[in-house]
């Protein structure tokens, strides 16, 4: 744990030294120690683990890593990555606690002390049993409708005819709403949709008021979650496991590939250019727990990085989230004029990237690929409305541990993606992923035999 916190500190300092532009001040609004202390304090009072909070505080107290100081801001016209902190002014430094010197004990006759009894060490907590899966890959697309993607009327032949026979179909996978952002946030943090996220956060908004349940579920409206709201990425960092989000088309204002690109306060979340990157496809950019300590700047990267990371198993993160542009995800009306769009565009994206994942050493050894949908296309004007639940999209599991051609009729949703990913990697479920009604599809793969 101490090593993980020290690593976070180093990342934060590194991120601070490389950031430029108008959003730089958002990062330096809190120091490494101050932000970590906020996390520890908040986790104690909002459904987090008190033991974990104490461990964070103890690690900070014993660590020799100094608090990061704010360097002089560097002015630049370029956009690009940034780390928001929810305010524009630095958090005040905490004053050191004053401990007076102990008063001398009164003189007295010497007394013989009883020999100290040896303390019996407390039994160690049992560790979660590790399963066969060590690498999780998630690809998030836009659904043209269940029948048009995975059903008899499929417009995605690579998904339905090539991949489907190799994997297990989650026939009853259903979204929480129509938009990509709210489903993506649920799939990495267990947080439910609110008015802003369900609308795709047309502008980048902080939460104005925050109420957290005992399980850490945030009530209120806003887009950028407070620092105490954790994600699967935070869990992986604390366990000293690697994670990475690969965002298609992510670039700075000058058009150059850049890490962790997201809007400033009040700016729109979507790209002005058809076919371009949209922050709404990248849920990791909406959490202060990742923005403030530099994890987003370090691990939220352009999609092109994936090919390099897949080359060696030791370079492949334990958790990889792959987010295409709205055009490549299959969202109607989001591609440049004349380009392939809709279901055909999403299928082409899969056919370009899935073979690379399936051929990678990490996937072959102990991987699972979850091909899921995070949004649906609105009905085409004049076309018949599809029968059944419009939010039912289905999903597909691929893994060396899956029984090829299998089908599960169990009801799953984005919280299931989070819970299953956490169980694959021996993590505890967050938010509504921990709810009794949330089903996990990890059990069969954890036994190494596929199926539910």
Image: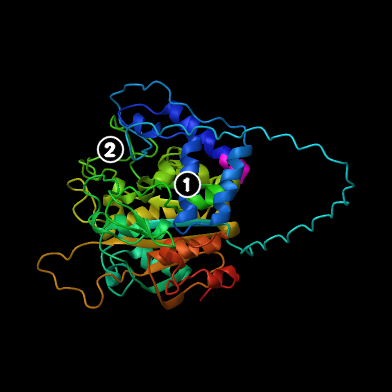
- Regarding mark 1 in the picture, which secondary structure is present there? helix
State whether residue 102 is above or below residue 372. above
Residue 356: tell me if it is visible.
no
The residue beneath circle 2 is 264
Residue interval drawn in magenta: 1-5
Residue 238: tell me if it is visible.
yes
In the foreground, 23 or 279? 23
Q: Is residue 194 magenta?
A: no
State whether residue 181 is above or below residue 291. below
In the foreground, 24 or 171? 24
Crowdedness of circle 2 by 10 Å Cα count: few (<14), some, many (20+)? Answer: some
Crowdedness of circle 1 by 10 Å Cα count: few (<14), some, many (20+)? Answer: many
The type of colouring in the image is: rainbow
**Image-based side of 229 in relation to 196, left or right:** right
The residue beneath circle 1 is 39
Question: What label does residue 447 carry, if any?
Answer: none
Residue 290 position, x and y percent, is 43, 44
Instruction: Tell me which corner region of the image, top left, top right, bottom left or bottom right, holds residue 153.
Output: bottom left
Instruction: Tell me which corner region of the image, top left, top right, bottom left or bottom right, holds residue 302.
Output: top left
Q: Are marks 2 and 1 in contact (CB under 8 Å)?
A: no
Residue 167 position, x and y percent, is 47, 68
Q: Residue at x 45, y 41 (%)?
A: 305
Q: Main secondary structure of the magenta part?
A: helix
Q: Is residue 2 magenta?
A: yes
Q: Residue at x 30, y 71 (%)?
A: 392
The residue mark sitting in front, 2 or 1, is 1
Disc 2 from disc 1: Cα separation? 23 Å
């Amino acid at each position: 744990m101490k090593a993980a916190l020290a690593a976070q500190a180093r990342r934060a300092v590194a991120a601070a030294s490389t950031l430029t532009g108008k959003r730089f001040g958002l990062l330096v609004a809190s120091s490494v120690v101050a932000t970590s202390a906020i996390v520890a304090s908040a986790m104690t009072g909002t459904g987090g683990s008190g033991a974990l909070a104490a461990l964070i505080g103890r690690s900070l107290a014993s660590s020799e890593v100094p608090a990061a100081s704010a360097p002089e801001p560097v002015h630049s016209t370029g956009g690009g990555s940034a780390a928001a902190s929810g305010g524009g002014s630095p958090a005040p430094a905490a004053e050191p606690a004053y401990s007076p010197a102990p008063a001398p004990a009164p003189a007295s006759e010497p007394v013989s002390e009883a020999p100290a009894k040896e303390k019996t060490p407390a039994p160690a907590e049992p560790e979660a049993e590790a399963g066969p899966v060590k690498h999780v890959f998630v690809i998030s697309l836009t659904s043209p409708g269940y029948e048009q993607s995975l059903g008899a009327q499929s417009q995605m032949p690579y998904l339905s005819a090539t991949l489907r026979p190799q994997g297990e179909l989650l026939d009853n996978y259903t979204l929480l709403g129509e938009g990509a952002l709210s489903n993506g946030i649920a799939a990495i943090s267990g947080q439910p949709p609110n008015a802003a996220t369900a609308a795709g956060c047309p502008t980048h908004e902080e939460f104005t008021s925050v109420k957290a349940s005992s399980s850490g579920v945030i009530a209120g409206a806003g887009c950028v979650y407070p620092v105490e709201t954790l994600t699967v990425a935070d869990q992986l960092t604390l366990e000293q496991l690697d994670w990475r989000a690969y965002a298609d088309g992510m670039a700075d204002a000058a058009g150059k590939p850049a890490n962790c690109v997201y809007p400033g306060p009040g700016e729109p979340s979507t790209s002005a250019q058809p076919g371009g990157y949209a922050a709404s496809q990248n849920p990791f950019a909406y959490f202060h727990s990742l923005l403030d300590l530099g994890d987003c700047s370090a691990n939220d990267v352009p999609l092109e990085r994936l090919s390099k990371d897949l080359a060696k198993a030791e370079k492949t993160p334990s958790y990889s989230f792959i987010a295409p542009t709205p055009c490549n995800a299959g969202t109607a009306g989001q591609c440049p004029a004349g380009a392939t769009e809709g279901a055909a565009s999403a299928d082409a994206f899969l056919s370009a990237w899935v073979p690379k994942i399936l051929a990678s050493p990490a996937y072959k050894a102990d991987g699972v690929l979850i091909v899921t949908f995070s949004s649906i296309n609105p009905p085409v004007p004049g076309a018949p409305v599809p029968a059944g639940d419009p939010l039912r999209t289905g999903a597909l599991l691929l893994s060396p541990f899956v029984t090829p051609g299998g089908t599960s009729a169990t009801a799953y949703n984005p919280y299931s993606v989070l819970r299953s990913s956490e169980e694959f990697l021996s993590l505890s479920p967050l938010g509504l992923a921990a709810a009794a009604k949330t089903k996990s599809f990890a059990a069969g793969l954890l036994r190494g035999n596929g199926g539910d």
